[in-house]
Amino acid sequence: MSTPSHTTTIRVRYGETDRMNTIYNARVLEWYEVARTEHLRELGMSYADIEERGIYFPVIEAKVSFSGPATYDDRLQMESRMSRPSRLRVRFDIDISHKNDGAPVANGYSVHGVADADGRPARPPKWLNEILEKGTSG
Amino acid sequence: MSTPSHTTTIRVRYGETDRMNTIYNARVLEWYEVARTEHLRELGMSYADIEERGIYFPVIEAKVSFSGPATYDDRLQMESRMSRPSRLRVRFDIDISHKNDGAPVANGYSVHGVADADGRPARPPKWLNEILEKGTSG
Amino acid sequence: MSTPSHTTTIRVRYGETDRMNTIYNARVLEWYEVARTEHLRELGMSYADIEERGIYFPVIEAKVSFSGPATYDDRLQMESRMSRPSRLRVRFDIDISHKNDGAPVANGYSVHGVADADGRPARPPKWLNEILEKGTSG
Amino acid sequence: MSTPSHTTTIRVRYGETDRMNTIYNARVLEWYEVARTEHLRELGMSYADIEERGIYFPVIEAKVSFSGPATYDDRLQMESRMSRPSRLRVRFDIDISHKNDGAPVANGYSVHGVADADGRPARPPKWLNEILEKGTSG
């Protein structure tokens, strides 16, 4: 029983490069958010809907390791895996590679809390546990 | 009686360049927001305070013309002038140039509405008119 | 004979909103660049390829007018039209609206020079004129 | 003998917030780059000068942990410490806190390679070792 993964594809924008002619490091965290958004949507409820129900996933920790170059107009694929380090945490491990040849670009993760609209820790409601269960079991 | 102007200085961040080794065009609008923030602060009330009192300045229109190169670590100065095209509009004209030699980088403007927390047009309260009056008369 | 237009669809990223819960104004210029990239690709040569042949389209002027709200996860479509104000200029007029109901979000344009790798004005080569011709005639 | 630290102060820009009314997580990596830029400048050579001499510090790994809220217009201070995990690596550990009351916002680090203009690992020249020595010894 392996953990299911989700793949999201993006194309590097011009403004996401810097004068080294590579992707600017901070942008990878923005792409991670795109990967999480599409991963959750595939599980049956968009993160926008989750927020509308009053639950938020603030980032608690994020890490990225860079493994190879990428620049403007490259097609990159992000493969994400979801896990739950604890009842009050959701974690996404995300690998980024070139879509055409699989060459690695970056890998890392983000860990999120489960919070209410005021940023206070919130006990995950039943509907949320069901969605996250779908994302973490093979 | 000339209109008073305000000068804000910034330093170009690495992530604000692109692979042409110049500033990425969209970032100029972000700098404009920095210039407006400091200009309003100098008039005696920060924009954060204005929002706390329930008044917002959504951008209605923005324009930038690029006149010369700039890159990472350059010191740029933004000279802004405020005007009121109508009772419900605030406008900032902003020139950006190199701090060391005055060489031009960009010029343009942003026009803002006056709105309440729901984004609806709001009649500017007395305290707001007083602040804006300070910014627009010589 | 109408000018052909190109449509590019994007989804608003979380990091593209601000605390007003709307799209942050500077991001629209980044989306414009995405629209230009896809528009040129459809004409048969990517902008990445154009740069590899030594031709650059630096932004000379950009303008955006905001006409309606948009926020995280909204699907937006950008309809772009290309024109040539002169031999040494390329212009893109771009309308942004909601994909689901067509409600307007923003409209504006960007004007570009034709330059070599050193940023100097360059006479457009034959292959470039042919591509741009395809984009501007109905 | 403690490691010397450098403090850089920034003010949160409007575009650095998101619709949760907090700082957008990816922006912290951009601030880290601002902290590194000012830290190196204080040691006697700007990173722009280092690049002009043909040496680059590509990001190999970056991590951020979030510890408290921050929003638009907040003054934040970044305290950075430099270290050298190996001859070919430079590391910056950076704590971010509110300037007015010291309340923590985020902490983390970035690890950098030493590379030439083509991105290949480069043996640090003598002048670089001298600068980095200043930054890492108490």
Image (spheres, coloured by chain):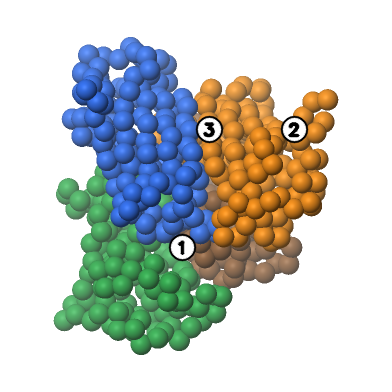
Chain colours: A blue, B brown, C green, D orange
How far across and how far down the image is residue D56, in percent? 63, 53
Q: Quadrant of residue D88?
A: top right
Q: Nearer the viewer, residue A97 or B83?
A: A97
Badge nearest the viewer, 3 or 2? 3
Q: Quadrant of the C terminus of chain D?
A: top right
Q: Nearer the viewer, residue C26 or A22?
A: A22
Q: Quadrant of residue D92?
A: top right
Q: Is residue D33 above or below residue D100?
A: below
> Which structural element holds mark 3?
strand
Q: Which mark is residue D63?
A: 3
Chain of the residue displaying label 3: D
Q: Label 1 near label 2: C-beta < 8 Å?
A: no
How far across and how far down the image is residue D98, in percent? 63, 27
Residue that label 2 marks: D5
Badge 3 and badge 1 both on one subunit? no
Please state if A37 lies on the left or on the right of C30 as rendered: left
Amino acid type, label 1: Lys
Residue that label 1 marks: B63
Q: Is residue D52 above or below residue B131?
A: below
How far across and how far down the image is residue C130, in percent? 30, 84
> Which structural element holds mark 2?
strand
* Alpha carbons under labels 3 and 1: distance apart: 37 Å
